[in-house]
Every structure is written in structure tokens, then in C-alpha cells.
Image: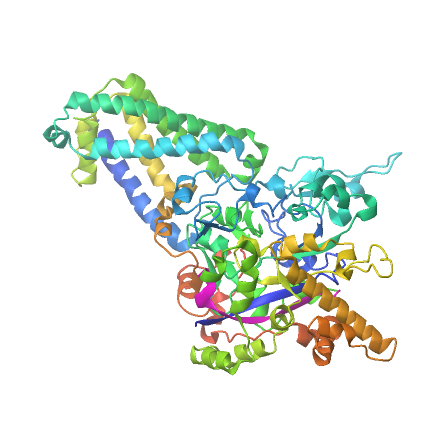
Amino acid sequence: MKIKAQTAMVLNLDKCIGCHTCSIPCKNVWTTRKGAEYMWFNNVECKPGIGYPKKWENQDVHRGGWQLKNGRLELKAGGRLHKGINIFHNPDLPTIDEYYEPWNYDYESLITSPERKHQPSIRPRSQLTGKHMDLSWGPNWEDDLAGASETAVGDINFRDLDHALYLQFRNVFMFYLPRLCEHCLNPACVASCPSGAMYKREEDGIVLVDQERCRGWRYCVSGCPYKKVYFNWKTGRAEKCIFCYPRVEAGMTTLCAHTCVGRIRYVGLFLYDADRIAEVASAKEDTDVYPAHLDILLDPEDPEVTDRAAAQGMAPNVIDAALRSPVYKLAKAWKLALPLHPEFRTLPMVWYIPPLSPIRDYAEPGQESDLIDRLRIPVRFLANLLTAGDEAPVRLALHRLSAVRHYMRSVRVEGQADEALLQAVGLDRDTTEAVYRLLALARFDERYVLPTTRPDASQLHQFQGRCGFNPDAA
Amino acid sequence: MDLVYELIFTVFPYLCLTVFVLGHAYRYVTDRYKWNARSSEFLEKKSLFWGAILFHIGIILTFVGHAGGLLIPQTYYDLFGITGDMHLSIAHWTGEVVGIAALLGCLLLLGRRLFNLRVRAAGTFNDLFTLGALAIVIGTGVYNVFFGRYNVLYSVAPWIRGIVTFSPDPDLMRPVPLSFKIHVTAAWALLGFSPFSRLVHIWSVPVFYFFRRHILFRRRATGGTGAEALSSPAPGGKEG
């Protein structure tokens, strides 16, 4: 057993209000450069919808991620030979139109405009060509279901559901899906990179692009099923979410998590068995991937695990952070958080707590069906999004969330603890209160538990001005 | 006249080769940040397809043909029963096909770079210059294949071999028609310019990808990243 640490995030969709506050500091700090205007390392999508870039989830279109072929795991876009043959023209590369053509406005013309009968107006101007353009797509184009009656039909999470029914006004549902790089355990982008410029960091599992080694072959962009590696059209290199590693190394959380006003994000460590990655990613059925993924996440409270990790050279502060990890609790101990599209077989490490939603109709007494089936968001949709279509884990998570609410309501409103619902979902009183505390009250240092990395002080001055992306490079 | 031949067909090729070798070394050490293919497929991929495929296949086969035809002496071909006439005939017909492919691809790419607004905006003068230079070299080459009607096996070929083996003889180029002289001189110039263009991506052909494991891990503190970063000056010319 080779034990490694992985930095990971859990997002509680039950609390996301879709304010996009997370995207803004990320944008301001990392992607305001020329060629990067269209990039959003963190973006918030509205579900149902086809997202950013268009139809990123549909691998029949984009051919990202892995697939099992005759029991063997291989890149969906094709192996090494296929890449060699297509190196001059990557057939699976999306173009910028599938994200959006970035634009800006000549704000100054409002001020310099001569006196006229009518107020001056400004037209959008393309940041690619500098020409005026008509807007037909952009970031958050589908925000709050805008245009969803047309675009959301293409949302693949409607699989096995009648999308026409759920896009009717009286049945309509929506929730937000903030997305960032998944920092996968089995990253298809890294496997796709011909130059070997992409790598996973040994210490914390953050996936990075070595900007000096990237030769611009573009296979990472098409290889990532989440479409979270971006191509800088000006510099000709790939860029992606760096999990704010300069902050994380200093023990601070990522900008998106730090600024989240809904406090929906949790950042911490997983310990996992790195020897079993290939086995897990090659699980027989798509629905087997999530349970297998869960299985290699190791319990940091198991002394055998921590002893072995220490013996393999893991630093004590890393083990300590893993012991206090909020993401381990949410994902494995309580099984509230689920991975995003495990069927892509990249073993993503940004997980989501599925959202509860309003109850659609009242059941007649005696005819009460499962409460979860009466929620406005169909369980099947969430299952297609989070567990490759297996409803059981989504039901368990939603039942637990609702049981915690029921219990806390009985304590706080009725003044009498009602544990009736807890047992059925496998929670006891202490765990329930711990869940409540982490989901509702947890302070900064409980939500974000990251070990600091000791820098190599002797060389630090030599790296000044070298981290991140170079704004001067063209 | 002797001096002119000496300058154009001995000094100039060695000058270009020197710049070629030292230029690549210099660029790799000082400017690895911009050492890439500078692909514009992300902005426009439909018209790129035929341009890029035709050009790349054509130019690679042209390169193989030049290497095989010019660097290997005719006497070796004679050993295998390929006479000079047969050799010329093979070179002529294959040259026509791959030369036209490369030229057509190159012109398609040039047209795209000039007239597609997005590609033009993303590109630099260097990109345009590189393509233009390629078009001139390939264009004169194709002209020679179709209209040259000149046997290069006993003049241009031994001259090139002389340069490669450090025994240059510019007099071999005296009887060569002007269009061939322009072609070889333009080609040397392009060779000398290539380290400062996007053509450096040729040297980054990802050969190791075929043998390496899929997932790469790197340590943060030691080895690879640190040492590499130290070997080049700070991007943007900033000193630490």
C-alpha cells in the first residue's frame, strides 16, 4: 500500500446561491491576461443546461476522459498512436466559440461622446479581433435557466428522464454547479500530454502544467472530460486551475473557497492508496467506479494507516491535517458528498453534496411515497450527475440531509429531540450534531484544513517573479 | 566572381548553420517559455485542417526526399542498381506530388493567417514571416521540380555533401541554374532563421510520449522543476 495525500474540495450544493463570487477573485488573480480572457478556472453553471464549454459533459461530442475497452482502460480520444497521427490537427479540440468569444466595451466613449440628443451607448467589441460583435453566447449564458427551454434539452443528465416534462414551467427545477479543476487521481489531461508537461504533485496531488515544458499540442484540453484545461490562444500554451497552490502551501485556502459567501466549500486532505488507482479506474461498470473510489480513500483515524504513512515519509503536519479533514468526513465517513461524473474514470477529487429542493406536491395520507421522490429536482438527474446513474448513494445523502434537518428542527423548534428518522439513515445523535455543525456553523479553520509546506528557504529569492503565468509572454 | 561564389556558397551556408545550432541552444536556454507550436487551431479549425495536414505531410516527405537524394552519394544508389536516370525520375515524380502538397498547404495556411481575422489577431509578424519564407523556399523548389530540368545529382548534391563534411567546393555551383541557386540560398536563410521562429516545435516532437507511463508525478521541492527554472533567467527579463 502506497499512501499519498490528496488536496480536495467538497461543495455543498444545498447551500449554493449562484452568486458567482467564487469566480471573481479567481478571475482577477489568475486569468485577466491576454489570451486568457475567456478562461474561468472556476465557473458557476446553472443546471439543467449545457454549460461551459457547450456540452462539456457529453463525451460522445468531446471524447474526453477514459473508457473501458475489452476490459482495458484507455483514453476515450484514442491512445498514443492516434495522438501521433493527429498531432497536426486535433479532431477533438473545441474551438473558442464553444466557450465564448471574449468581449469588452469602449467605456471611454461614454465620457468622450459629444453632446447629442440621445444618450451615448456602447457596443461590445471582441477581445480577439477588436471588431464590434453581436453577442450570441457568453459565460453564464444559461444563468437561472435563461434560454433553458432550448439549450437544456442537450443536458445529458436528463438521461432516462423526459426532459420535455421537466422543462415545463410548472415542473421546472434548477440548481447551481460551481466547477473547477477536479485534480483527479487518474487525470486524463496528464495522460494525454505528449510533452510530459502536465503532472500531479507528489505531496498534495495538485495537477499543474509546467509552463516551460508545454509545447502547445492541445491534447490536455480535449483529454480533460471536465474541460478544465484551457488553451491560451495568445501564448499557445495550456493553463488550468492551480488550486491556488501558492496560497495552499502557506496553509491558506483557495480564493474560490475563501470568498464563498454561502460557505459551501470545504477544503482538506484525503489519504489514499495510490497502488490501487488503476484497479479503481478500471472498475467493471460505470456505477462501480464511485464505490471503488470511496474504498481507496483511507481512514486517517486508523492507526495502521497513519503509521504506514509516517513510515513512508509523510510529514507529521500532513497526517495531522488529514486527521482533521472536513472532506473525509463529508465524503467517506458520512457519505454526503459525491464525485462529479465518476463514469469519466478520472477519479475526480472535487466532490458535491447533492441539493435538497422544495417538495412538489402533498401526498394524500396513507399514500406517502418516499419524500426524496417528491423533491422538485429529480433524483435520477442528480444520480446521472454524481454517481453514474446509481440512485442509491444520492438517496442516502438526501435522506441524511433531510433527517439532520428534521432532528435539528425537533431540538430547536419543538424543544424535544426526535431521533425517529435518524436510525433509518444510519446516523446517531452525536454524528448528526457533528454533521449539523460542519454544514451550518463551522468556522474558517474547521472548513479549511490544510498543512503548510516548508519552503526551501535557501533558493526562495531565485524564484521571485517566476511563479504562475507570465503576463509578459506573448 | 570567385569571391562572390565563395561568399554565397561557402560562407553563407556555414553562417546559417552556425546560427542554426547556436540559435537553438540560446533559445532553449533563455526562452523555453515561448518554445512551442503556437497552434491557432483553437481559434479556427475548419480551414486549418487541409492547410495543416497537406503542409505537414508534404514538408516531412520533402525533407526525407532531400535527405535521401542529396546526402547519400549516387554511387551508393548505383550499387543497388538505381541509376542516375532512375533516381532523377523517382525524385521528379515524388517531388512533384509532395512539393505540390506542401506548397498548397503552405498557401492555405498563409491565406488563413492573412484573411482570418481571429488568426491574424492572435498571430505575430514572426509567424507571418516564417510562413512567407517557407512559401518562397517551397515555391522555388516546386518550380525547379516542374520546370528546372537540371540534373542536381552531380552538382548541387556533392556541393551539399561537401558542406556537411567540411570540404566545401563552391565551384560545383557554377553551372547550376539561377532558380536552383535561389532555392538553396533561401533554404539556408530559413534554416538560420528557424531557431527564432515557431519552427522550433520540430525539435519537440513528443517521441517519449510513446514510451512513458500515463500519469506523471513530480516532487515539489527538489529535482525537475527547481533545477530547470534555475537554468533560465526569470521570464520577462526580471532578475531574482
The one nearer the camera, B217 or B75, is B217
Whether A274 is drawn above or below A34: the answer is below
Residue A231, image x, y percentages: 54, 47
Quadrant in which residue B3 is drawn: top left
Whether B133 is drawn above or below A362: the answer is above
What's the image's color scheme?
Answer: rainbow
Quadrant in which residue B152 is drawn: top left
Would residue A41 appear left or right of B184 to someone viewing this image?
right
Residue B216, image x, y percentages: 43, 60
Residue lying farthest to the front in this orientation: A366
The one nearer the camera, A438 or A110, is A438
Residue A167, image x, y percentages: 77, 44
Would residue A454 appear left or right of A118 to someone viewing this image?
left
- From the image, which quarter does the N terminus of chain B lie in? top left
Q: Is residue A263 magenta?
A: yes
Residue A383, image x, y percentages: 65, 55
Query: Which residues are drawn in magenta?
Result: A262-278
The one nearer the camera, B219 or B116, is B219
Would residue A113 appear left or right of B232 to someone viewing this image?
right
Whether A414 is drawn above or below A259: the answer is below
